[in-house]
Image (cartoon, helix red, strand yellow):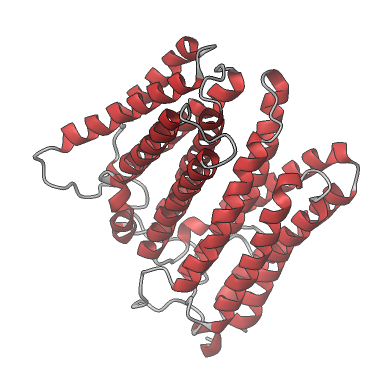
Amino acid sequence: MDERGAALLRPPGSPARATFLELFFDLVFVFALTRVSQRLIGGLPATGWALAAAVGRTVLLFLVLWLVWTITVWVTSRYEPEQSVIQAVVVGTMFASLVMGVALPRALEERALPFALAYLAVMLGRPLVIAAALHSHPRRLVPLRLAAWAGATAPLWVAGALGPDEMRLPLWALALTVDYAALFTGWPLPRLGSSPILGWRIAGEHLAERYQQIFLIALGESILVIGVTYSGEKFSGEGAGAFVVAFVTTALLWRIYFHRAGHLLAEALRLAHAPGRLGTSATITHLVMVLGVLTTAVGYEVVIAEPFHRSDAALLLFVVGGPLLFLAGRARFEYEIFARVSLPRVLGGGVLLLLVPLLAHGPAVRALWLVAAVLAGVALADAWRSRGRPPEMSASPIGRTGPESGGPEA
């Protein structure tokens, strides 16, 4: 086995905490996520298919960012982040992500080419650098698989950027679908098979901390939206109530996420025989929750600026839809950690759906207050259930039993 390549892998006793470089890397995503919110709020149609199409286009760009962040996290959980090669990979990914964030507000318009090229620089360049650094180590086949699949979809990204505007969205949607399918199937290649991430040997505690941090980054983006909007040109006493309830809502999202299950992801990954399986599931769950938080932040911006704006379909999509999406993801998270259905979150989501007809056409600030009341009810139910009980242990049904899979290069 190649000793130089082996030195690139995380040793068993490697510290589980995220490095300062990784926290520095996350700062780019604070900016990039604000661009997602800005694109959602800018010129959004009020109703109908036009609204759904506008949201769908922005979600596609968010999913591109999420894929870049996710694979970076798995790289630093799989390889030693103190190695200079891995640090160079992280810094390079950071710059490319910054370019993507700058281009994102108009990424499906005139800034399509820099967005696509930055994405391809990460998806193609990163695995090739890692493969070269691994030399003849058996695990070099994994990054080579990633590079091969990225090369296969690269023509779609470039054609979408350079081709007719009406072809950009379908081409990029197809390319991104293939990229995600490759991620979850292990980038299979003829004769070489696949290397699904559910069988990768990773630093589980490190992975858990990174997911907690991206959720906090999403909350931080919400705080940024609240502060910037209220301190802007429309600063007024009328917006003060919306400003307060927006902050309270963000605090409730934090409370609901971290109550019990949010603290136990690291333990669940440590106990899992196949932590990659649970980590893969947590990737999807945190994607849903982060998207819910970002969607909610868009609602803050509208309500704080115009608290008595009529609650049309577009506004309710954000003010109600964001917390609903978050609760759905958090209910799934409860199952991943404790193998049970989260009744307070299911009931909270049901109440939010029932409130939609009541909130339609009323003032925006009322919708925000009622959503905050529902979230407060979920948080209180959590507190009541755990009162006087000892802390629970993780009982995750995902990746708990059975040997790791994936062979010698997993």
What residue is rendered at 62% in x and 84% in y? 135
Task: Residue 109: give x, y in percent of width and height.
Answer: 81, 44
Residue 97 is left or right of residue 296, and the answer is right
Q: Vertically, is 269 above or below 232?
A: below
What residue is rendered at 91% in x and 42% in y? 164
Task: Residue 377: give x, y in percent of width and height.
Answer: 28, 26
Q: Vertically, is 37 above or below 117?
A: above
Front position in the image: 237 or 315: 237
Q: Is residue 228 visible?
A: yes
Total of numbered circles in the picture? 0
Query: Residue pushed farthest right?
Result: 164
Front position in the image: 305 or 24: 305
Task: Residue 400: give x, y in percent of width and height.
Answer: 32, 52
Residue 20 is left or right of residue 266, and the answer is right
The quadrant in which residue 229 appears is top right
Front position in the image: 31 or 137: 31
Residue 25 is left or right of residue 35, and the answer is left
Q: Vertically, is 132 above or below 383?
A: below
What residue is rendered at 53% in x and 36% in y? 235
Task: Residue 152: give x, y in percent of width and height.
Answer: 77, 57
Residue 221 is left or right of residue 112, and the answer is left
Q: Is residue 191 visible?
A: no
The quadrant in which residue 154 appears is bottom right
Query: Residue pushed farthest left?
Result: 388
